[in-house]
Amino acid sequence: MIIHSHNQQPSMLARLWLRLGTVLGKTLAWLLALGLLGWLAATAWYAWQYSGPVSPDEQIPSGEAAMTQGIIQTAVRIVDQHREGTRYLRDAHAKAHGCVKAEVSVLADLDPALRQGVFAEPGKTWHAMMRLSNGNAYPQFDSIRDARGMAIKLLDVPGKQLLADQQARAEQDFVMFSHPNFFVSDVAEYAQNIGAQADGKKVLAFFPKLDPRSWQVRHLFIALATLAPAPASPTQTTYFSVSPYKFGAANAKFRVAPDPQSCPDYVPPKQNQDLPNFLRSALNQQLSTDRVPACFVLQIQRQNPQKFMPIEDTSIEWKESDAPYETVAKVTIPAQDFDTPALNLACDNQSFNPWFGLEAHRPIGGINRLRKAVYEAVSDYRHSRNL
């Protein structure tokens, strides 16, 4: 009897493990099925919710002006928090890699439909100033994951400026960063997001309440994707407007992409990425030491209102399959010396604003309306204290 009992025990354990394995297997299969159903439901909901057609006109929500005033106060608070000694920095893109002279040449054979605003004259070359930067509101090491910025200012642009008190500027600015969409949709979401960040509560920027319906998981993933590793050089990155603009009678976004085939072959020497400012070093190496120009194309993506290409939601990337980018100009940064104390101070004092420009390229959408107020207020605040 003892021997018989002893022989039965492994069999009972085996059956127990088999039963447990079956339960776990079924549970896993159910979880996978539920996950697949959830993914299919979310995909179907997204396709339904985010589908065209969309309005080609701006739609201003009630309360936007009041929210904008609150955001200005928060932006000024960030400028105060990140003051460097006695110097007041930008509330975003505080650290420049350099301001450089550039030339923007409209294509000689440009399609007549694309001859709008500063691109109206085929073959025209504009002298320009370009600022290349990190995205953070505090000057941090280049090795830290971040967005990268490019701002281009065309000079001596004739015509009436958008801002009534800026008629003497004669400029057209294009302001971009290194990701095609933004991690907030509109002014209301921006107010909540920047408020949480200013209070040092970055997690609450995307999870404002305990209610899961308020969670902005998709936008969190956009933000994480925006914080990318540093490129080898600021001249090797593609920059996007993110928000839309008028392009004559149409609406469009734009981007500036590297165009190496239009410049001499150049491989930047590997920089020491442990140094805090290696992106400035890479730019200096190419333009000042090796005297090699950098080339880009400036491209336009026109809105197709029949597709899901909304004006009022900057978290939505306009798909190239819905509307391809079209090259309207070539951008060249010639060899030059730019890294001097006087030029760096002038760079820091330079203001770039998408509202510096012509009616043909008027910024549109909520985030651009917000920029108009915030850029002006923060710029005035900084410059009044940096005298």
Image (tube, helix red, strand yellow):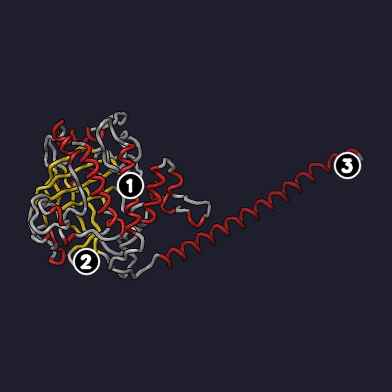
Q: Secondary structure at mark 3?
A: helix
**Residue under numbered circle 3:** 4
Quarter of the image where one finds residue 129: top left
Q: Secondary structure at mark 1?
A: helix
As measured in the structure, the alpha-carbon distance from the residue carrying label 1 to the one carrying label 3 is 83 Å
**Residue 253 vertical position relative to residue 231 in the rendered view, above or below:** below
The foreground one among 81 and 344 is 81
Residue at the spot 39% in from the left edge and 44% down from the top edge: 197
User: Which numbered tag is attached to residue 73?
Assistant: 1
Label 3 Cα crowd, 10 Å radius (few <14 / some 14-19 / many 20+): few
Residue at the spot 16% in from the left edge and 62% down from the top edge: 360
Query: Residue 180: x, y in percent?
Result: 31, 53
Q: Secondary structure at mark 2?
A: strand
Q: Looking at the rendering, in which quadrant would you find the N terminus?
A: top right
The foreground one among 221 and 355 is 355
Quarter of the image where one finds residue 187: bottom left
